[in-house]
Image: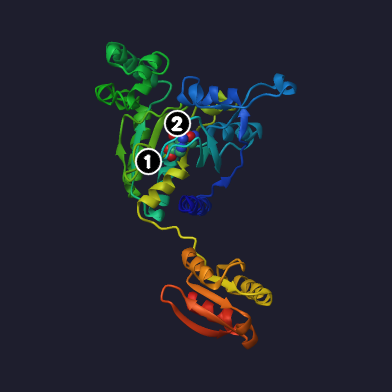
């Protein structure tokens, strides 16, 4: 459990550093939002809105204020904040990132949680294919830095001009195979036919379904070609998969999912796409947008599966026996942390030496420093290198420097 938390923090730190290089600014968005926000963006017929939102119980005095929910994803909240700040009109080209918990009602399993962390990026005001490619290159940069094996799959869903014909073709196909559809697809066919394409139960049926790429108009085809070309030039590996339709309503043109082969069923670690109509749909100016979100919990699992270790062992465990020794040991610990930047843990003085040495070993510390009355009188400490059971005596005054030169040579 601790290792997954450390892996999440590690990915977050790397992603934050990457944002500086790509000139993306942080935005903090609230966890509570109005329910309408998601119905109008994520989509009234999406699984998220239909089945997965946590609504907040209303107090009598707030009954007139409308229903609030815990955010299931970040994109709508970022768009809302952007419009509320008037940026869609005053300064539309913006790049934001956010990091925090999202909440969805799920049946929890490995890699699928009710509360999970996303690190997301949203770019507004750029309609050009170079922007799509830049975001995918950004994700690939992170993948390389983390030394993760991931599979990038891309698709284009077309635009409001060419998508209706594609939607109709899938609808006709679904109607022709009505008896073979799974319960879910059967129920949502008329309202959201494209979901048939990424249905896991109806995978065989989806293979024979119409292909979105065959329906792209010239502008959309050209856009998608440019994205692929720029990725190839940047040395980013990807495959085109016409079944990447995404379960959220706002996408158009480029959509993508990045998955880890090291994970089981819940293997999508990053997902996103272009959503040029969303800002206007939520009451803003007609500004284009595109973004993605990393599922930090899943990416952390993928890192751990790949054999990466995230130890949190201290450099030094201090065992002080007796009150006076504890006082001196506290000073030394502070000195080691402040002046020598060592990771130091003071062990509870309540137990005997043997138990404390065992504890230092279990913590994975490199060195145990033992200071008892006898040592204190002589102005020394016993320093034990735990892995080798080697012990030596070091003068207290020289202890921080001696440990630092062993632990951080050079
Ligand atoms: P999404 O595909 O719903 O897209 O979620 C993005 C990522 O969040 C997934 O690929 C997965 O790694 C992670 N994730 C989703 N649900 C769970 C869960 N229950 N447990 C653990 N991890 C999960 C979005 O949320 C869009 N807002 C992405 C986006 C940003 N599109 C444009 N901009």
Q: Is residue 353 above or below residue 376?
A: above
The residue carrying pointer 1 sits among few (fewer than 14), some (14 to 19) or many (20 or more) residues within 10 Å by Cα, namely many
Pick the front one: 293 or 184: 184
From the viewer's perspective, tell me whether residue 128 is left or right of residue 344.
left
Q: Can the viewer see residue 45 in this picture?
A: yes
Q: Residue at image x 37%, y 23%?
A: 195
Quarter where residue 335 is shown = bottom right
Pick the front one: 323 or 193: 323
Q: Which residue is mark 2?
A: 107
Distance from the alpha carbon under mark 2 to that under mark 1: 22 Å
Q: Label 2: state its secondary structure.
A: loop
Q: Which residue is mark 1?
A: 258
From the viewer's perspective, tell me whether residue 102 is left or right of residue 234.
right
Q: Residue at image x 33%, y 38%?
A: 153
Query: In terms of sequence position, does the residue under pointer 2 or pointer 1 come before the other?
Result: 2
Q: Is residue 110 above or below residue 313?
A: above
């Amino acid at each position: 459990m601790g290792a997954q938390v450390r892996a999440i923090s590690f990915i977050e730190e790397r992603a934050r550093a990457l944002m500086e290089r790509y000139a993306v600014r942080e935005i903090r968005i609230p966890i509570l939002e109005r329910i309408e926000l998601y119905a109008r963006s994520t989509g009234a017929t999406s699984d998220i809105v239909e089945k997965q939102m946590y609504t907040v119980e209303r107090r009598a005095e707030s009954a007139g204020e409308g229903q609030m929910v815990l955010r299931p994803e970040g994109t709508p909240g970022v768009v809302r904040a952007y419009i509320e700040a008037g940026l869609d009109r005053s300064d539309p080209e913006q790049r934001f990132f956010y990091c925090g918990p999202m909440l969805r009602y799920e049946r929890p399993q490995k890699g699928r949680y009710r509360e999970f962390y996303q690190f997301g990026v949203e770019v507004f005001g750029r309609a050009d294919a170079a922007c799509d490619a830049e975001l995918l290159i950004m994700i690939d940069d992170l993948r390389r830095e983390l030394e993760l094996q991931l599979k990038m799959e891309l698709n284009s869903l077309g635009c409001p001009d060419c998508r209706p014909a594609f939607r109709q073709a899938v609808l006709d196909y679904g109607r022709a195979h009505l008896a073979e559809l799974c319960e879910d697809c059967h129920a949502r066919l008329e309202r959201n036919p494209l979901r048939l394409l990424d249905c896991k139960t109806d995978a065989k049926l989806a293979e024979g379904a119409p292909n979105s790429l065959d329906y792209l108009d010239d502008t959309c085809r050209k856009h998608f070609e440019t994205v692929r070309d720029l990725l190839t030039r940047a040395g980013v590996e990807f495959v085109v998969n016409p079944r990447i339709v995404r379960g959220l309503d706002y996408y158009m043109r480029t959509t993508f999912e990045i998955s880890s082969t090291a994970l089981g069923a819940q293997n999508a670690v990053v997902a996103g796409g272009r959503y040029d109509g969303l800002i206007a749909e939520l009451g803003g100016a007609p500004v284009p947008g595109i973004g993605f979100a990393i599922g930090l919990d899943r990416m952390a699992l993928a890192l751990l599966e790949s054999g990466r270790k995230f130890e949190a062992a201290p450099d030094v465990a201090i065992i002080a026996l007796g009150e006076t020794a504890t006082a001196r040991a506290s000073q030394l610990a502070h000195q080691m942390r402040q002046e020598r930047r060592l990771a130091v843990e003071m062990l509870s003085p309540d137990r005997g030496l043997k138990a404390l040495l065992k504890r230092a070993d279990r913590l994975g510390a490199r060195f145990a420093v033992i200071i008892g009355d006898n040592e204190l009188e002589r102005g020394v400490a016993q320093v034990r290198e735990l892995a080798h059971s080697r012990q030596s005596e070091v003068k207290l005054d020289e202890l921080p420097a001696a440990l630092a030169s062993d632990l951080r040579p050079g």
